[in-house]
Image: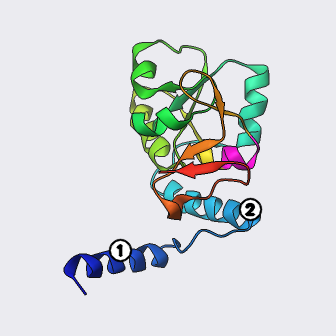
């Protein structure tokens, strides 16, 4: 066994140790894994308010909401929540008086993003379970040009926790 194969095996074992075995096939088990991972990550940004997909959808019906996609441009090129803007776009435009909700794949990067804005007095809610939870709620996704899609960029097959009817790509 080569050194690279040994390192890959150690990495695989480490991921299994933190709850990253093969993604479950059952949609409810996938949702539970998303929630479990989110709860573990959220410990790193305890002061950041979280919002569920259901709460976000209700907010969108009753007020102006700025959705900030903190994922990489490569991830955003595959799909995003309708109306979302990038971190760069968010920094360039004033958002006074609007609710701000950040998301990423599962809520880790968006939680850190929200935390960095707190010292400036900017309240950013973190979408609990982020784009993965959005898929389980049947939320629409679009490409950057607005074309509907069911593809979601994930880091790899271990992050393939999308709902049935959506396709994970990496």
The x and y percentages for residue 149 are 65, 35
- Residue closest to the eye, 46 or 102: 102
Magenta range: 133-138
The x and y percentages for residue 102 are 54, 35
Q: Is residue 88 above or below residue 6?
A: above
Asked whether residue 72 appears in the rendered view, the answer is no
Residue 134 in the magenta stretch? The answer is: yes
* Residue marked by disc 2: 27
Snapshot quadrant of residue 113: top left
Q: Helix, strand, or loop for circle 1? A: helix
Q: Is residue 169 above or below residue 15?
A: above
- Residue closest to the eye, 13 or 47: 13
Mark 1 to mark 2: distance in Å?
A: 26 Å
Which residue is depicted at the point 42% across and 27% down? 87
Asked whether residue 99 appears in the rendered view, the answer is yes
* Residue marked by disc 1: 11
Badge 1, how many Cα within 10 Å: few under 14, some, many 20+?
few
Which residue is depicted at the point 48% across and 50% down? 108
* Residue 117 located left or right of residue 148: left
- Residue closest to the eye, 2 or 124: 2
Q: Helix, strand, or loop for circle 2? A: helix
The x and y percentages for residue 96 are 54, 13
Q: Is residue 10 above or below residue 158?
A: below
Which residue is depicted at the point 78% across and 21% down? 62
Badge 2, how many Cα within 10 Å: few under 14, some, many 20+?
some
């Amino acid at each position: 066994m080569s050194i690279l194969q040994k390192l890959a095996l150690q990495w695989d074992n480490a991921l299994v140790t933190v709850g990253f075995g093969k993604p479950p096939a059952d949609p409810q088990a996938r949702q539970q894994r998303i929630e479990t991972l989110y709860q573990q990550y959220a410990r790193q940004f305890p002061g950041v308010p979280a919002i569920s997909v259901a709460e976000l959808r209700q907010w969108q019906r009753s007020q102006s909401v700025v959705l900030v996609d903190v994922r990489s441009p490569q991830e955003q090129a595959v799909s995003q929540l309708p109306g979302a803007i990038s971190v760069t776009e968010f920094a360039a435009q004033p958002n006074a008086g609007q609710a701000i909700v950040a998301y990423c794949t599962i809520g880790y990067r968006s939680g850190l993003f929200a935390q960095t804005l707190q010292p400036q007095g900017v309240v950013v809610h973190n979408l609990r379970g982020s784009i993965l939870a959005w898929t389980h709620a049947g939320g629409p996704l679009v490409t950057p040009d607005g074309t509907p899609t069911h593809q979601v960029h994930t880091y790899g097959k271990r992050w393939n926790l999308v709902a049935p009817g959506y396709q994970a790509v990496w």
